[in-house]
Every structure is written in C-alpha cells, then in structure tokens.
Image (cartoon, grey):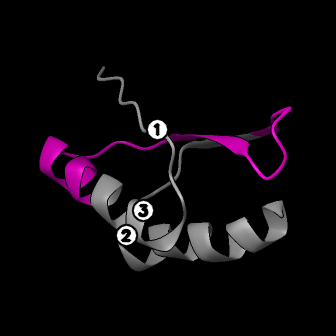
Amino acid sequence: MLCVCYKEFLPFFSRNRFNIEELHVKETKEKGVAIFNVTIHAEPNRIENLKKQLRRIIEVIEVSITAR
C-alpha cells in the first residue's frame, strides 16, 4: 500500500518544485491508512495550492499546516 502511495505522492513534489525538508511515514492501526508528515517551506498561497492538488492524486483525510 505505501509503495503505491509513494509512487503517486513523491513525484508531485519534484514536478511542482517543492523541496522536501523532512519526510516521516507511519502506518496506522486502520488498514490502508498511513500518516505522512512532510516538512516544506513555501509561501501560504503555494501551500494552499499544494493541498488542493494532493487531494486530487491521493485520498487525503486531513491536512494540517504549522507556520514558523
């Protein structure tokens, strides 16, 4: 399951010129659901666009953003 998701998920970042600073992936108890924690630095409008595009390529349950 996670390999399929990686193949859809990671090329998206390089195509859109997002530099991934950190990537942490953890399986959950729920079958077919994983937690992806991705750290990037971008302007707020690019992050909003990122959220919309991610929802198109993989099933996203929740996106949370922490500003620094």
> Start and end of the magenta stretch?
26-49
Image coordinates of residue 53 in percent, x first then y, are: 34, 66
Q: Is residue 5 left or right of residue 14?
A: right
**Circle 3 Cα neighbour tier, 10 Å, few/some/many (<14 / 14–19 / ≥20):** some
Q: Secondary structure at mark 2?
A: loop
Mark sitting earlier along the chain (3/1): 3
Front label number (3 vs 1):
1
1 or 66: which is nearer to us? Answer: 1
Q: Which mark is residue 17?
A: 2
Q: Secondary structure at mark 1?
A: loop
Mark sitting earlier along the chain (2/1): 2
Q: Is residue 13 left or right of residue 67?
A: right
Please determine whether, in this image, residue 67 is positioned above or below residue 55. above
**Circle 2 Cα neighbour tier, 10 Å, few/some/many (<14 / 14–19 / ≥20):** few
At 29% from the left and 59% from the top, the residue drawn is 52
**The disc labelled 2 sits on which kind of residue?**
Arg
Please determine whether, in this image, residue 1 is positioned above or below residue 27. below
Q: CA distance from mark 3 to mark 1?
A: 11 Å
**The disc labelled 3 sits on which kind of residue?**
Leu
Image coordinates of residue 26 in percent, x first then y, are: 79, 37
Label 3 belongs to which residue?
A: 54
Q: Secondary structure at mark 3?
A: helix
**Outermost residue to the front:** 30
Label 1 belongs to which residue?
A: 62
